[in-house]
Amino acid sequence: MNYCEKCSVAADGDRCPNCGTKKVRIIESEDPVFLIETSVIWSGMVEDMLKTEGVSYEKQSLIGAGIATFIGSLADVLMFYVRYCDLERAKEILIPLTDTQPITEEEYEKYFEAEPSGDEQPQ
């Protein structure tokens, strides 16, 4: 596995999948790698989940404090990074937040009540 120092991305090939550079090197277990990009609203949940499981992380603002002060901090986007040796574990921890599989009809019926027919009387 290779590593792009510019993007902090693990790469299978000899190019960074993010920026396309060939300036990649063999990845080391302590290298910080990109985990997830999230809005400020969701960032607290990501932090809590990683802290609870003892995974150390770094976060970086995408727009910076000056611009966030001007346009509002809720518009900011945070990038989370973990050590390469913790990457797979961190991904597993965040599965509940990142699982984007569409809901099936059976799941819909299980978790959501059917709409009232209108014939039912309020109690």
Image: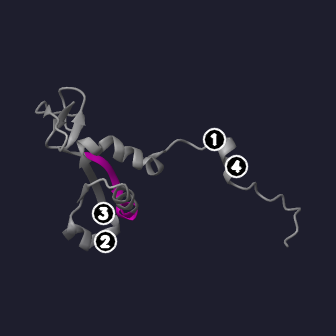
Rendering coords of residue 116 (x, y %)? 80, 59
Q: Which residue is mark 2?
A: 72
Mark 3 or 1: in front is 1
34 relative to 15, above or below: below
The residue singled out by tag 1 in the image is 104
The answer to whether the residues at label 4 and label 2 have Cβ atoms under 8 Å apart is no
Foreground: disc 2 or disc 1:
1
Task: Tell me the distance, in whole angstroms, between the alpha carbons under discs 4 and 1.
Answer: 10 Å
40 drawn magenta: yes
Q: Is residue 115 above or below residue 2?
A: below
How far apart marks 2 and 1 lie (CA) works out to 37 Å
Q: Residues within 10 Å of mark 4 (few under 14, many from 20)?
A: few
Question: Which comes sooner in the sequence, label 3 or label 1?
Answer: 3
Q: Which residues are magenta?
A: 34-44
* Percent of width and height locating residue 39: 36, 59
Q: Earlier in the sequence, mark 4 or mark 2?
A: 2
Tell me the distance, in whole angstroms, between the alpha carbons under discs 3 and 4. 36 Å
Quadrant assignment, res 51:
bottom left
**Which amino acid is tagged 1?**
Thr
Q: Secondary structure at mark 1?
A: loop
Dot 4 lies on which element?
helix
Q: Residues within 10 Å of mark 1 (few under 14, many from 20)?
A: few
Q: Amino acid at mark 3?
A: Asp
Q: Residue at x 10, y 33 (%)?
A: 23
Q: Quickly name the residue at label 4.
A: 110
**Could you say which disc has been placed on residue 76 in the image?**
3
Viewport quadrant of the C terminus: bottom right
